[in-house]
Image (tube, rainbow, N blue to C red):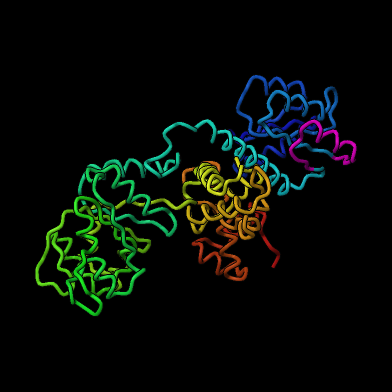
Amino acid sequence: MSEKVLIVDDDQSFCEMIQADLRRHGIEAVWRTSADDALALITDTDDFGLILVDLIMPELNGIDLCARVVANRPDVPVVAVTAFGSLEMAINAIRAGVHDFVTKPIDLELMRLRVRHALKHRALQQELKALHAVQGQSVHFERLLGTSAAMKRLYEQLARAAETDATVLIAGESGTGKELVARALHKRGTRCGGPFVAINCPALPETLLESELFGHAKGAFTDARASRKGIFLQAHGGTVFLDEIGDLPRALQPKLLRTLEERVVRPVGGDTEIPFDARVVAATNRDLESAVDEGRFREDLFFRVNVIQIEVPPLRERRRDILMLAQHFVERFSQQAGKEVNGFTEGFGEKLMDYAWPGNVRELRNAIERAVALTRFDKLIVEDLPERIRAYRRTHLVLTGDDPTELVPLEEVERHYITHVLNAVNDNKTLAARTLGLDRKTLYRKLERYGVLKLE
């Protein structure tokens, strides 16, 4: 989707000023000084993401131009510029389909904010339309959903790993869906006809965890009235999933290592080793290499489970999947609740796209389940979201991910970081320059260019 802005104003110097400011901040812009020329350009090209229109112009006025643009290109938002704010003019502009207003004299920072908001609004509309376009297409791998580049890479890794019987370590933040990835690997593998047996390592006390993993013999401990198979034997012919293996107690790690190396288990209290045949998949939300360095996780066990490593991307790195996942959860939970909720408003979608999702897909699922349960309408609205999501304001730049609409120019990253360093050193320019590896003159030039220079 284009982010090119068309500026329409009969004042050429004003057009050039706005164009220069937008370009400085990474937004491409062109201008025309007559409504007729602008209409011809809009007709001949299809790559404008926004039109900035002066409402007071000779010949065809701005309101009539807005109406014609909206009639022919309803997907392109129009932001009106005027020096004469009147209620009647505002009403007429709204009736013509204007998305937003800025007033002269122009506050450039406010103008950029309105432009970016309108561009983001259009991007959201396109995303919502895309939800319908991809219905029925292959946008999933088993129960995993997503069309982002990050998810496509994950699907490719899973397809290759499924062809082998090698041990797999699934790494990713909490809430990213690591167990779903493990189940997808099992379903696509050669052992799909066998059982999938999962255990959450930190969920059980050490003594009980050992029994669950390896089984126990009759009389091995109090209440062991009968022998019991551990999960490795239960998963014979299928897959064992060791969730959060990074939290496995240090005392059990040597026994697990021998089990994986020899493909045999010795039940607690038993005196014989029993062979098993199951694929092993482990998962962790911890940095296991750091845990090895700190002595919390055995290096030899790390190498044994890390034969093939698969990284599950956090939700912030697959932002174009957010609305698709949200719609999927709306359909699931509305069916479970017996409610006719068929989607969400644009404002609801904007809040979803703005939020950082520290809890990843699990947090998104819970937010949609709550919204469906509480809503009184057939579409979810902003008020149905938890307060933390409604009130969220992004305070950082997106430096990862594959969505071009989320990325920013290098100059903006530099400005943001220089401002951050200045705040951290209480505006001490000498210390800031030293921290940034610049001399003071260079720092001052950058501060002047970015408009953040403060008087000492």
> Residue 104, relative to residue 177: is it above or below?
above
Q: Which residues are magenta?
A: 83-102
* The N terminus lies in quadrant: top right
Q: Nearer the viewer, residue 113 or 453?
A: 113
Position in image of residue 135 (x %, y %): 49, 33
Query: Can residue 407 be spotted in the picture?
Result: no
Q: Residue at x 76, y 32 (%)?
A: 97
Magenta region includes residue 165: no
| Nearest the eye: 275 or 317 | 275
- Relative side of 160 to 55, left or right: left
Between residue 322 and residue 356, name the one nearer to us: 322
Q: Residue 429, image x and y in percent?
A: 60, 67
Residue at figure coordinates x 60%, y 28% from the top left: 47
Q: How many marks?
A: 0
Q: Is residue 328 left or right of residue 236?
A: right
Q: Quadrant of residue 331?
A: top right
Q: Position of residue 178 (x, y in %)?
A: 37, 54
Q: Position of residue 101 (x, y in %)?
A: 78, 41
Q: On the picture, is 385 further left or further right than 253?
A: right
Would residue 146 be seen by someone viewing this image from the given angle?
yes
Farthest residue, direction front: 225
Residue name at image x 59 percent, y 42 percent: 26
Indicate yes or no whether the magenta region holds residue 94.
yes
